[in-house]
Amino acid sequence: MPKTIAITGNGAMAEAMRQINPDVVAAFPITPSTQIIEDFAKFVADGKVDTELITVESEHSAMSACIGASVAGGRVMTATSSNGLALMWEMLYIAASMRQPVLMTVVNRAISAPINIHCDHGDSMGARDAGWIQFYAENNQEAYDNMIMAPVIGENMEVRLPVMVCMDGFIISHSIETMEIEEDQKVRDFIGEHTALNSLLDTDNPVTWGALDLHDYYIEHRRGQQEAMYRAKSVIEDVSMRFGEEFGRKYDLFESYCLDDADRVVVAINSVAGEIKEVIDELREQGEKVGLLKIRLFRPFPYAEIAQALKGCKIVTVMDRSTSMGAYGPLFSEISNALYDAEAKPLLYNRTYGLGGRVMLLDDIKDVFKESEEYLNNGKVEKMFDFLNVRGG
Amino acid sequence: MKDKYRLKKWQELPPGGVITEGGNAADYETGTWRTWRPVWEEKNCIHCLTCWVFCPEGAFLLRDGKTPSGKDRKEIRKIDYFYCKGCGLCVRECPVNKKGAKEVIQFVREET
């Protein structure tokens, strides 16, 4: 039986790591993800895991050590946030292109400058092209569940890609919520043993990793990597289904909330979805046809499935908690791409919110739906791109 | 061209750019890099093997031979242009070349 406990998001991720019991964890603490590694270090000290914990001198070294340990044939995990993720940048690409299934929690935090410790998605969104599978989670339960599924997905022989599980800094990482922690043995049975592929320590079958790869082969390797991402989507569907059968919580590539008959839809990522659902419940009672599409999987991005889910709605507000300076928000760009081939295109616009932890209250969400109602009544979008809750408009 | 040297399709590659066989540098045709070609003149060669020592690609191939007084020795047989990348080290280090009266290894522009 699962245990229902009250725990922070960080605590939940540390529990997931304890249950996964990786061979190696290499990490450098950074707010707000620090508690994950603090808790995990305690598990190591108490002998609750068999993990070799490497306390490195920077996040660049953390990811480098993770890649080395993974290439040596181990199951490897780490966690970071914000500028820590930025310092890993070079190694993120190398982990992905060397097809090492490293597992990482990213506790989303704004990137400097100005220095800020609170939530937005600028860190992981900036890493969206690095070649990692990216999951996003509304609350600690989803983050935990995504992490339990992550090794099964990343280590699948058809995939072999690193997996990033993202959740909101402070809002989720430091807030205590009740959730279900599954039994250790059940989780371990679900995940199974790690299988090394072309391990450096297999001296009977010597291999070279990280060799030079010029114009005669680089593009072929990249093509294969893209294919692994395509294949990951169906593997994720299979694993999510198996997870649902085993543990009773069902996950699709994204969550549809009151979407079937909705005229006005908001597309959003992570914790704000909880507030949006609250507002939708209220507006639905008043007869308003509103709905939410909550992103779970951002890489690979499920274009066709999302286009299908948004079929029939009349207006879509895409809420980005990060900026791509000089462009629309990263989520908006993907939704816009997904809808390009749709037969009946809904009105579509982009709102940036919550940067650096700027709070979105329920009334702010209501304003979002009020605006989409106005736009729909007028039959046109006044402002394609705007910031919410910013002084000066 | 041997199948071994055929460029593979992306589907045929192991993931992550890993090289799964040991010692396969031998399969790599560094000769394609060459813009200048060392040409060995056997009649001028004293078989001191200086070129063989300096060559970074092991492109000087040897044969068994005799010194003028009849002792066994190794001699230069030929340059293996599959590996010779045209660096010119042999041309510079050849002691006969250095004396300047005769040339053992000429350095000529690769025919295009």
Image (cartoon, rainbow, N blue to C red):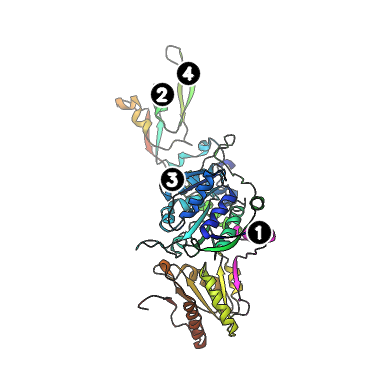
Q: Amino acid at mark 1?
A: Phe
N-terminal of the pair, mark 2 or mark 4, is 2
Indicate which disc residue B65 carries.
4
Residue A176 lies, with reference to residue B22, above or below; the image says: below
Q: Secondary structure at mark 2?
A: loop
Indicate which disc residue A243 carries.
1
Disc 2 and disc 1: Cα gap in Å?
68 Å
Q: Mark 4: give few (<14), some (14-19) or many (20+) Cα within 10 Å.
A: some
Which residue is depicted at the point 41% across and 53% down?
A87
Q: Quadrant of the N terminus of chain A?
A: bottom right
Which residue is denoted by mark 3 in the rendering? Answer: A56
Outermost residue on the bottom side: it is: A378
Q: Marks 4 and 1: in contact by CB < 8 Å?
A: no
Which residue is denoted by mark 2 in the rendering? Answer: B49
N-terminal of the pair, mark 1 or mark 3, is 3
Q: Are marks 2 and 1 on the same chain?
A: no
Q: Is residue A235 magenta?
A: yes
Residue A13 lies, with reference to residue A336, above or below; the image says: above
Q: Chain letter for mark 2, please.
A: B
Q: Secondary structure at mark 3?
A: loop
The range drawn in magenta is A232-261
Residue A266 image offset from top left, x and y in percent = 53, 75
Disc 1 and disc 3: Cα gap in Å?
34 Å
Disc 2 and disc 3: Cα gap in Å?
50 Å
Q: Amino acid at mark 4?
A: Gly
